[in-house]
Image (spheres, rainbow, N blue to C red):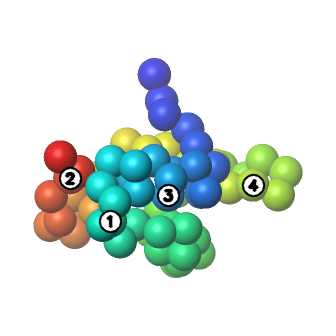
Amino acid sequence: MCKIRSIRQAADYFKELDPDTQITEYTLRKLISSGTLPCVKSGNKNLVNLDQILAVFSAQGISSVK
């Protein structure tokens, strides 16, 4: 099952896993606006898949969250 979250929820998820993470709301918004991270627009919210966020960072050679 897909783990779909709002940008804020996704940033909070990574912050909970790793308090020192640099995956912030701003980072996610920049990745979406550049077209690097796909999203689904729902009203005023952009919804993202947590697995796709990890895939974006894995493709950049950055290891996934432990």
Looking at the rendered image, the disc whose residue lies closer to the viewer, 4 or 1, is 1
**Quarter residue 20 falls in:** bottom left
Whether the residues at callouts 4 and 2 have beta carbons within 8 Å, the answer is no
- Along the line of sight, which residue is nearer the eye, 57 or 24? 24
Disc 1 target residue: 21
Q: Earlier in the sequence, mark 4 or mark 2?
A: 4
Q: Amino acid at mark 4?
A: Lys
Residue 45's tag is: 4
Pointer 4 local density, CA inside 10 Å: few below 14, some 14–19, many at least 20: few
Disc 3 target residue: 11
Left or right for 58, reference 42: left
Q: Amino acid at mark 3?
A: Ala
> What is the spatial separation of the Cα atoms under label 2 and label 3, in whole angstroms?
15 Å
> What is the spatial separation of the Cα atoms under label 3 and label 1, in whole angstroms?
9 Å
Disc 2 target residue: 64
> What is the spatial separation of the Cα atoms under label 3 and label 4, in whole angstroms?
14 Å
> What is the spatial separation of the Cα atoms under label 2 and label 1, in whole angstroms?
11 Å
Write the residue at 40% across / 49% down: 16
